[in-house]
Amino acid sequence: MKPAMHSPAPADAPSDARRHGPPPAGGLRRAGWIAITASATAIALLSARYFTLDPDSFLPEQRVTYLANLAPLMLHVGGGVVALVLGPWQFPPRLRTRRPALHRLIGRVYLAAALATAVGGLLLVPKGLFGPIAPLGFAALAVLLLVATVAAFVSIRRGAVTRHRIWMVRSYALIFTGVTFRLWISGFSAAGVPFGQAYGSGAWAAWLLNLLVAEHVVARIGTGQRAAGPAAGDPAP
């Protein structure tokens, strides 16, 4: 009696690992980019109500202060809105490679907007709520944003492309505090935490959490760069 013959599985039949394995990294990155872009745009549109100069649109606890300091407020809000919206569009590789002129234009506008929001924020720090903890947190955020944004500009001027990308990631992580800070306050307020505590802790935690995520991204950029070899203008590792 002949043993039963088993026909081989078709070569193109998907394996269990392929069917049930993790989604491709590219898909995760795309989903993350969409989530960041959508939330940043939503917060930017929400913040744009400040441009009406309607006192009812201001934070109630800061209404008098904002009305007395409209110039730094508009500098801070205006720069933040533009940087939040434009920042994500600096990162898609396809845009960088296929439309380099547009990439550079977006980058220049972003850099100016990020510097504006940092300067406006520093001017508002002495008038901040729940001092000294919250104002110090926002002052540290503004200084770090200035450092990261200037470093990104200097790096690209020197032709250090990878270093420029790294500093841009850090810069936008700090800009994205506009989103995480609001989520922090909303979440803790919904949990019954007093507004002052949520505000003061968020003034530090929101941007620190963003920088932790940014450093994870930076580590991956560095790993990819070492594998691919130094980019033009970048020193060899």
Image (tube, rainbow, N blue to C red):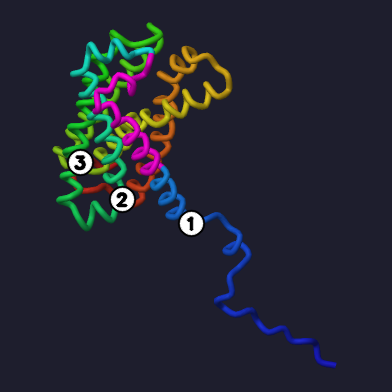
Image vertical order of residue 183 relative to residue 124, above or below: below
Question: Could you tell me how far apart the alpha carbons at marks 2 and 1 are, in whole angstroms?
Answer: 17 Å
Q: Position of residue 63 (x, y in %)?
A: 32, 14
Q: Position of residue 207 (x, y in %)?
A: 39, 25
| Identity of the residue drawn at 34% across and 29% down | 174
Q: Hey, what amino acid is under mark 2?
A: Pro
| Identity of the residue drawn at 37% across and 10% down | 129
Q: Which residues are magenta?
A: 36-60
Circle 2 sits on which residue? Answer: 92
Q: Hey, what amino acid is under mark 1?
A: Pro
- Nearer-N-terminus badge (2/1): 1
> Residues at badges 3 and 1 in contact (C-beta under 8 Å)?
no
* Residue 58 among those drawn in magenta: yes
Q: Position of residue 91 (x, y in %)?
A: 30, 46
Secondary structure that dominates the magenta span: helix
> Considering depth in this image, is 94 or 167 the residue closer to the camera?
94
> Considering depth in this image, is 84 or 189 the residue closer to the camera?
189
Circle 3 sits on which residue? Answer: 107
Drawn side of residue 51 relative to residue 30, left or right? left
Count of number-bearing discs: 3
Q: Which mark is residue 67?
A: none
Q: Which secondary structure lies at badge 3? A: helix
Circle 1 sits on which residue? Answer: 24
| Identity of the residue drawn at 16% across and 39% down | 108
Q: Which secondary structure lies at badge 1? A: loop
